[in-house]
Amino acid sequence: MERTEISRARPLRRVASLAAVTTLALLVSACGGDGGDQQAEAEGGQQQAAALPEATTYGKVANAPKDPEPNAATEGEVLHPTRELPVHDGVDGTEIARLPVKQISSPTWVPVIQRDGDWAQILLPTRPNGATGWIDTSGDAVESAQNDYAVNVDLDEFHLEILDGGERIGEWTVGIGEPDSPTPTGRAYIIASIEETVNDYSPIVLPLSYHSDSHETYGGGPGTVGIHTWPDDSFVGKANSDGCIRVTSDALDALVQLPLGTIVNIV
């Protein structure tokens, strides 16, 4: 397992559009032998694995374990799979999903919420909100990094702050979801950075791992909750979005400097 450090100035990978999703083929290694039965078993295993849902914002893993402590702090470890990895429902448990190398064409970085040796429990970017799973990080399966940044959002106070190692480095008043489509609460994280080319309300959109509880789909997408700006500041201190968190331009400038996988605590 390779380990790197994430610096404050580390840029986010930007992509052209939310629709640019890369689907990766399952990597399968053979144990050897040319027998027909072995080949059939290998093909059957590959088909079975390929039938598992992909752990992206477009996926749903109904049987995924729930986040056991959705308001707790993490140790800051984030992981990037070097290849598509199976996601299990427990340590060496049943496979429930596939974790791809990319999310919306940004590199996949997922926060670790618990460790058991080489096994890591991670937050998933799928429905339902708060879905988790376990991956085997042994060998060269993942790249590991330390991310000491966190974003806290207080919906009642319309307040967003960025922390670095527990120290506040910025705070802003924001807009949130209206009562009919509230911003969901819990321990989400930034999954990608999108350079907007279709709409003009925000130059960059930061999709989160959480989804709207009111919209199964929105604008042709899966109802992903994001952080973005707005053409004017009329949203500040108001609940008038469809669930996304609206921020001022200077807040977005600071947020886009954060690494992928940064926790966004929404209460």
Image: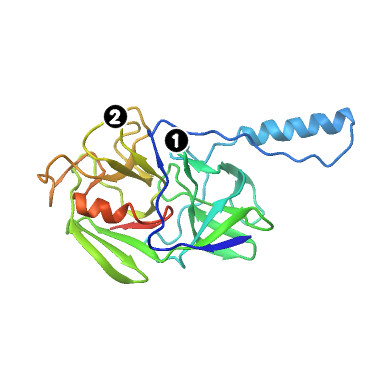
Res 72 seen here: no
| Residue 243 drawn at (x, y percent) | 25, 42
- Left or right of 207: which side holds 230? left
Q: Residues within 10 Å of mark 2 (few under 14, many from 20)?
A: few
- Left or right of 1: which side holds 28? right
Q: Is mark 1 on a helix, strand or loop?
A: loop
Asked which quadrant contains residue 142, the reply is: bottom right
Q: Which residue lies furthest to the left in this view?
A: 234
Identify which residue is drawn at 29% across, 29% down. 198
Query: What amino acid is labelled 2 in the image?
Result: Val
In the rendered structure, find residue 58 and report the number of the disc placed on it.
Answer: 1
Q: Is mark 2 on a helix, strand or loop?
A: loop
- Left or right of 166: which side holds 24? right
Identify which residue is drawn at 40% across, 45% down. 192
Disc number lying in front (2 or 1): 2
Q: Which of 138 and 10 is in front in this view?
A: 10
| Residue 139 drawn at (x, y percent) | 69, 57
Real-space Cα separation, disc 2 to disc 1, in angstroms: 19 Å
Q: Is residue 226 above or below residue 114?
A: above
| Residue 29 drawn at (x, y percent) | 76, 41
Point out the image quarter for the C terminus: bottom left
Q: In this view, does 190 lie above or below 223?
A: below
Q: Is residue 84 above or below residue 200?
A: below
The reply to whether callout 2 and callout 1 are in contact (CB within 8 Å) is no
Query: What amino acid is labelled 1 in the image?
Result: Tyr
Q: Nearer the viewer, residue 31 or 254?
A: 254
- Left or right of 148: which side holds 199? left
Disc 2: which residue: 198
Identify which residue is drawn at 52% across, 47% down. 64
| Residue 18 drawn at (x, y percent) | 38, 34
Query: Which label's residue is closer to the chain start, 2 or 1?
Result: 1
